[in-house]
Image (cartoon, grey):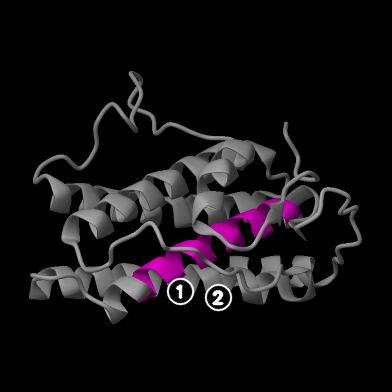
Amino acid sequence: MAGTAAVVGVISGCSDKDDNGGGGINLGTGDIGILNYAYALEQLEAAFYKQVTDTPYAGITADETQLLADIRDHEIAHREFFKAALKTSAIVALEVNFSKIDFSKRESVLATAKAFEDLGVQAYNGAGKLITDPNYLALAGKIVSVEARHAAYIRDLISNGSFADSSVIDANGLDKALTPKQVLSIASGFLKSKLNANNLPTS
């Protein structure tokens, strides 16, 4: 993957010495900060799907087991990609808080999966304009398309044929977007670790 090699090469030459006056785990600035932001979200998703497959809900079908395991593997691959690419600039492994999720119940698991996948798509869409390096932007585009496939599948599991609706697609047929601040406000409810996004670009 030539693009990956280029990204790894660029990132490995960077170091994060940014201000952390706000406390918590500093995501950093510029493109490094945005990549750490994505890395944090991928850590959260990977941990969630690992828990889902480690402790399957009552009545899970063989098809659901296989497809949820596929999503788990995608999220782990995304997580590991960012970790390897960021090298010494990567944030630490995050501690999750899944106390609000009942992993024994299909409804609870799928509702959370839907929330995470929709959030992931909106996060990448919202962060794209903040990325300056076109190599990073191309990679983000490849990842968000996978996240959108996950979102469509989870929605279809909840209600067959409901792969997308107006809650995530606007009147122009475009996926909606959220800022890092909006996304992290939601994601923080599933994290013990506190993230500091004060140095992320905003425009």
Residue where numbered disc 1 is placed: 76
Could you say where residue 160 lies in the image, as x and y percent from the top left?
Answer: 8, 46
Q: Position of residue 90 (x, y in %)?
A: 72, 69
Q: At x 25% / y 48%, what residue is drawn? A: 152
Determine the CA span between mark 1 and mark 2.
6 Å
Magenta segment includes 44: yes
Q: Relative to residue 76, is residue 167 depicted above or below?
A: above
Q: Is residue 127 above or below residue 76?
A: above
- The quarter of the image holding the C terminus is top right
Q: Main secondary structure of the magenta part?
A: helix
Q: Which residues are magenta?
A: 33-50
**Front-most of residues 58 and 39:** 58
Q: Give the residue type at disc 1.
A: Ile
* Amino acid bearing label 2: Glu
Whole-percent x, y for residue 68 in the image: 25, 69
Q: Which mark is residue 11?
A: none
Q: Residue at x 38, y 29 (%)?
A: 174
